[in-house]
Amino acid sequence: MFKFPFAHLLLGTVLTFFITMPVLAQTPDLVVYTYDSFNSEWGPGPVVFKSFEEHCACTVKVIAPGDSGTVLSRTILEKANPKADVLLGVNDSEVHRSFQYNIWEPYRSPNLKHVVPELQLDPQHRITPFDHGYIAFVYDSEALPHPPQSLEALTDPSLKGKIVIESPKTSSPGLSFLHWTIAVYGEDGYLAYWNRLKPNLLTITDGWSAAYGMFTKSEVPIVLSYITSPAYHLEYEKTERYKTVLFKEGMYRQIEFAGILKGAKHLERARQFIDFMLTAEFQDTIPLTNWMFPAAPHSPLPASFRIVPKPELHLTLDRGRIAAKNSAWLRAWSRTMSN
Amino acid sequence: MTAGRWMVWGLGGFALAAFIVGFYGPILHFLIGPDPLNPAAPALSWDILREVLSDSWILGIFGFSLLQAFLSAALSILVALPGAWVLARYDFPGRRWFEHLTLLPFLLPTILVVLAMVLFFGNRGWLNQALGWLGFPQIQFLYSLSGILIAHVFYNVPLALKLISAAWMQLSGQYEQAAQMLGANVWRRFRTLLIPLLLPAIISAFAAIFLLCLNSFAILLVLGGGPKHTTLEVLIYQLARIELDIPRAASLSLLQSGLAIFLLALLLQLRPPTPRQRPPNLRKLGADLQSKCPEAWFALAVLVALTTFALGPLLAVLVDSVRIFKHGQWHFSFQTYLDLFGFRGNTRFLDSLRNSFGIALGGATLAMLLGSGTLLLILNSSKRTRPLLEGAFLLPVALSTVVFGIAWFHLYQRILAGQVALVWVIIAMHGLLVCPYWLRIMLPAAEAIPRQWFQVSRLLGHTSGTFLRRVLLPWLRPSLATAFFFAFTLSLGELNAILMIADDTVQTVPLEIYSALGGYRFARASALGVVLLLASLLLLVLLNLGAQDRVGSNFRKRN
């Protein structure tokens, strides 16, 4: 009887894989932590890190495990023995945590002069802004010809079960939305607003991807995303079906920062990188790869950004207040929403 | 000492040492030591435990976590029972494929399966479109408890099916005939005879599914319809990853896993001894169908229903990967696949695929080694120590992987960083994490080995090696293949533990899927999922070729 050499084949396969496994990586000249979609094949990462490598004639190692919250947590947890020199991609709803754990090595880049002044939030220059944007409700104009024009209009009974948002507990746009409602309704009124909004939320997802995926699969006509999302669809899908509106109460801004980590092993290169980050080479890549507005605009925005409305009124919450109250807000929100 | 004894103590000792060094050590080190972010305070304090226990909201979440895991496990077993009956009774072409293919959803990152379920079962999903087209009212079951249960049943029925059918196949038909002669009707035979005889397998399946559902995350959030169906795992994730409140996360995790293990240990103690076994005797489904046997038609219906249910959402992933949205309409296109293999001329995707396979094969191989050790220890333990051992080897799955990741990170990043390539560290973690599931699948099969074989073999003067090669391995081979493949799929899809230590040398396909999803590339994420499935099918072919169970095939020849 023919016996199939099952065990040998399996063993052979396993061994082949191990022999070809990467061994210890070579030591790089700069280590950067960033979030996964920044360094995806389509993100800004492959372009900007490559041009920095050419610029400095050095090698850069990019580590991008998970979303921005995960990467920040990991950086904080290993702050006694930091593995990275630069952390790129902390947004302003998370920044208070990074200050609390004192992870930054301050650096004032000479190129900061190109940066829009209102984005320069940290007088101590621990962190440097590289792009910004607004969270916004994106809608499907085919399913919803008359979209809501304000936060309050989102609670209209005609939208029952038609909205998907991300959870403020696990996602950064979700947290910014919670802060948005606090900025508009105040600490006394935001929970009442959420109670009014609740029937219209089909579900609350763990992250942006699940929510936006449900939206593009036509499960819901409204999703919490970014103001630039319609530009993606115009650029790559040549459609204006997905749109967004400016809400009457004002739009909530998100700013993304990078900074040098305390204990960085390649301090000089890290400073060089922060300088590079504010040059045209880096900044002009941002709109069509990271779908945000450059912090230091060197060139006009790409054509597909014509579909993106320009907010006049923007809201933010005081960072000190976020640092002091965030946990309590989240707890109160969780309890309100689970009733 | 005989060679057999040596093997028990050698492999068993290795497994025990691995669990202590790799799991209990880091966890205890983490719990006893100081809070990593606040060295003045301990990681675990009674005050926090007391505070957690006196918070009725947290206790409510805790109750719901256990309830949904209980309901999911019970429902999965109920749905699996008819299928197990079919597998225990009939042979049909593609039988082994059916058993293995249904395990495939575990390969994919949960979020992909969740989106596929939305596409398939959603309010505007294919099922509802088809119903609407046929003039039926729409059904809405996602975004509520039923959404969670359906998704969990979808995931776990195959596991229950495998474990229960394996036991069912080996039940002696004599009892059933005797009961029939004594005038017991079908329902009575089922209730008083079959269920008690199948109970060991049912409890084993229940334990594994209960633990898998307890740690479920994305399914609960997305398909549960928001925070009203939140679980402790979500809270632990939020505390450990987002708020970095590690003491509170550790207390909750300890509470959850402690109670889960306590409940399971009770359950495992209730387990009756495994009944006497015999080699399987299967009827041919095709022949029965031709002779118009009503039972065979029912079996066919069950098979079709289970296949549709299990493969439907996977089909949704496939369809999603070959369509692109352009000028406001969906178009059929292979563009995503072309991009995958040739975009910007890089081979990053192929590297990820190789990494994923290397890690998963290594993880599954290690799980098999560790599992054999734990299996031998459990089978050789006394009645009193056995539940203790089973509980100790189950704990790694009950504990939140988020906490496990952080604990490992603390102990080993300092010791191992720069000394060992990171892949090996991840393989070690995965081996420990998936070993308990390997054990759950193998335990019923190993217990079912007829005792007299040992005596017969001794009488024939077999050495331990011959006995192993000639008797045990052929008997265990089908279960070994399933257990290996299941361990492989779990390791391939695992993400939480990886995220805490990954660097640029361990880019894997699930990580690529997440970054594609994070950058609007939904079709690309689906295509990555399909490639992952196809690559795993190759492994499945290997396993199926190797796992032709000789006991069964000999028997079929005689018929």
Image (cartoon, helix red, strand yellow):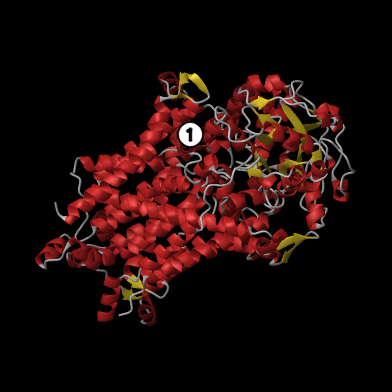
Camera-nearest residue between A238 and A154: A238
Secondary structure, mark 1, is: helix
What amino acid is found at the position of numbered circle 1 in the picture?
Arg
Quadrant of the image occupied by residue B474 = bottom left
Query: Residue at the location (50% across, 45% down)?
Result: B422
Pinpoint residue B338: horizontal percent, then vertical percent. Answer: 68, 65
Pinpoint residue B167: horizontal percent, then vertical percent. Answer: 29, 60
The answer to whether residue B197 is left or right of residue B481 is left
Pinpoint residue A78: horizontal percent, then vertical percent. Answer: 55, 31
The answer to whether residue B112 is left or right of residue B381 is right
Q: On the rendered image, what quadrant is the N terminus of chain A found in?
A: bottom left
Q: Residue furthest left?
A: B459
On what subunit does the disc labeled 1 rest?
A: B
Q: Which residue is mark 1?
A: B414
Camera-nearest residue between B183 and B258: B258
Q: Residue furthest right?
A: A300
Q: On the rendered image, what quadrant is the C terminus of chain A found in?
A: top right
The answer to whether residue A47 is left or right of residue B179 is right
Q: Is residue B278 visible?
A: no
Q: Is residue B138 visible?
A: yes
On screen, A290 above or below B45?
below
Query: Residue at the location (39% across, 79% down)?
Result: B286
